[in-house]
Image (cartoon, rainbow, N blue to C red):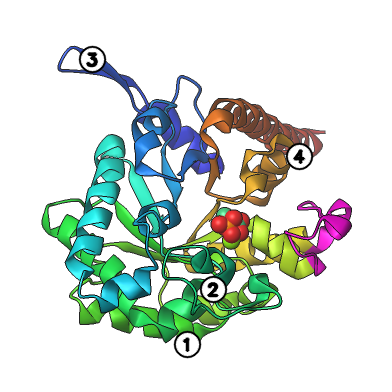
Amino acid sequence: VYEGIVKSLVKKEEKEEGGKVVVAGAPLVTGTEIKVNVSMPEVAERAAATGADGVGLLRAEHMILGIGAHPMKFLKEGKEEELIERLVEGIRTVVTAFYPRRVWYRTLDAPTNEFRELPGGEDEPVERNPMLGWRGIRRGIDQPELLRAEFKAIKRLVDEGFDNIGVMLPLVSHPEQVRRAKEIALEVGLVPHKDVEWGVMIETPASALIIEELIKEGLDFVSFGTNDLTQYTLAIDRDNERVFKLYDEKHPAVLKLIKHVIKVCKKYGVETSICGQAGSDPKMAKKLVRLGIDSLSANPDAVELIRKVVAQEERKLMLEHARKSIFKDEEDLF
Ligand code: PEP
Ligand code: MG
């Protein structure tokens, strides 16, 4: 954190480009990067104007489910090209608006109940608890056609020259899923770590507890999906109103998992971030700064506040460190 703050003091400045003032970062300087979550390409320009340092979560759901048909049916009808084109256009809008700031694209993560609502979704399995069901990377690996289309779209953008894209896998719980997803990417010519940054979401207690094994599969970054990490750690269905009062992202068990992951990631030089709702919560942001997280990704309307809170907390932290070292020297003196 310390080094980051010092670097950022010299890194961020306003530049004039084609008569337009471009703010690289925001007026307030933070060593911890403050990014933004983008749920659909239509809001990319506005999200970029917040001065966020990048996109910590670009959601695929709106782009893919927005085709107005069940995407698997769509692919079976031979319309892969149409789906890829839609993705290319959507992702291009975002990576262009933010360039050269980095954009982490999260592969499709829709539960079966959302798939079923789409035209052609009648055959979608009915699950008792879709939150524990066929979603995220589990489904991506079982039905690689969709994942392949997503990777092909990203590969096209890489070929267009975009070097600011990252791929993030949702709901990972086993190293084998990282390995398999990488194979699928390579099958379509997308090379993780070279063409794109490669990361996973930490959304299950399993992924937090086996972080070292996940890192050994090769990761550039991880991002805490605290919405899911909280529901699975505390066994509270996000969609169940009866138990929602017990839902707490700052529960010591959740924080303990986060702390463990950051510690291990630091050891291996893997970048850490957060893109769950907790990243937009000032109290949580302060805790995460103290835990040494590299970036926080907030909702567009929270970016400014989170940057202020983080800047204050970083200064406090530096002062605490400085005072500690001063008193240590005085002890040495007297
Ligand atoms: C999360 O789980 O925190 C997250 C960002 O993903 P989603 O809310 O889409 O499940
Ligand atoms: Mg999630």
* Local SS, label 3: strand
Gap between marks 4 and 1, in whole Å? 48 Å
Mark 4, other Cα within 10 Å: few <14 / some 14–19 / many ≥20: few
Q: Which amino acid does label 1 sit on?
A: Glu
* Local SS, label 2: loop
Query: Residue 163 appears at what percent x and percent y?
Result: 22, 52
Q: Which amino acid does label 2 sit on?
A: Arg
User: Going from the N terminus, do you reach mark 4 or mark 1 first?
Assistant: 1
* Local SS, label 4: helix
User: Going from the N terminus, do you reach mark 3 or mark 1 first?
Assistant: 3
- The residue beneath circle 3 is 20
Q: Is mark 1 within 8 Å of ligand 2?
A: no
Please provide the residue range marked out in magenta.
234-253
Q: Is disc 4 in contact with disc 1, using a CB cutoff of under 8 Å?
A: no
Q: What residue do we see at 73% from left, 34% from top? A: 320
Q: Is disc 2 in contact with disc 1, using a CB cutoff of under 8 Å?
A: no
- The residue beneath circle 1 is 176
Mark 2, other Cα within 10 Å: few <14 / some 14–19 / many ≥20: some
* Label placed on residue 135: 2
Q: Nearer the viewer, mark 2 or mark 1?
A: 2
Q: What residue type is labelled 4?
A: Lys
Gap between marks 3 and 4, in whole Å? 49 Å
- Considering the image in quadrants, where does the C terminus appear? top right
Q: Does the residue labelled 2 lie within 8 Å of ligand 1?
A: no
- The residue beneath circle 4 is 328
Is 245 within the magenta?
yes
